[in-house]
Image: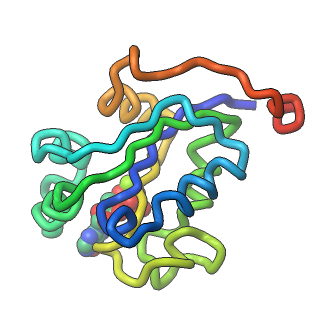
Amino acid sequence: MERERTLIIVKPDAVQRGLTGEIIKRFEQRGLRIIGMKFMQVSRELAEKHYDVHRERPFFKALVDYITSSPVVVMALDGTNAVQAARNTIGATRPSESAAGTIRGDFGLEIGRNLVHGSDSPENGQKEVALWFDESELVDWGRVVDPWLYE
Ligand code: IDP
Ligand code: MG
């Protein structure tokens, strides 16, 4: 089974709405392990790098405005199939189409206010964690419950 890293961003709308703890809780109780976490104001430069694949899309400027509009909480998580597990916990990109029980399906309505980011492939998980965190900010640690999460 693949041990992967994924980058999670609790976006400005979620932080402003007081949902930070609720969102962290969902990843934590799923068994994903936090290996890095910080509260920060995102620069336009970092936002544009992070969303570079969307540079030519009509919503690019609005997306960069959104992610830089107010502070975010950024997390690096790892675990078995962490990328897909986190994406399923987050829900579909468009909250009106996200399943109930997912973060977006429980707390969101519009695509431009969809609360949380999660990496979309193991390669991008590695790349995004490296973009947002210095290696010295990541902590390698073990949990006493790991044998009850990992076979
Ligand atoms: P994802 O966050 O589910 O991976 P992506 O397609 O990678 O979705 O899009 C990145 C982000 O860009 C979305 O989370 C959303 O905030 C925003 N976005 C995507 N498509 C649209 C759109 O059509 N209008 C406005 N914002 C969009
Ligand atoms: Mg994406």
Q: Nearer the viewer, residue 62 or 68?
A: 68
Q: Residue at x 46, y 59 (%)?
A: 20
Q: Is residue 46 left or right of residue 132?
A: left
Q: Residue at x 14, y 67 (%)?
A: 62
Taking the image in four quarters, ligand 1 sits in the one at: bottom left
* Count of number-bearing discs: 0
Q: Residue at x 29, y 62 (%)?
A: 12
**Residue furthest top in the image:** 136
Quadrant (top left/top right/bottom left/bottom right) for the C terminus: top right
Q: Is residue 119 above or below residue 117?
A: above
Q: Is residue 118 above or below residue 106?
A: above
Give the quarter of the image for residue 128: top left
What is the basis of the colouring in this image? rainbow
Give the quarter of the image for residue 82: top right
Q: Nearer the viewer, residue 86 or 144?
A: 144
Q: Residue at x 17, y 55 (%)?
A: 68
Q: Is residue 13 left or right of residue 104?
A: left
Q: Is residue 27 above or below residue 148?
A: below
Quadrant (top left/top right/bottom left/bottom right) for the N terminus: top right
Give the quarter of the image for residue 99: bottom right
Q: Nearer the viewer, residue 22 or 44?
A: 22
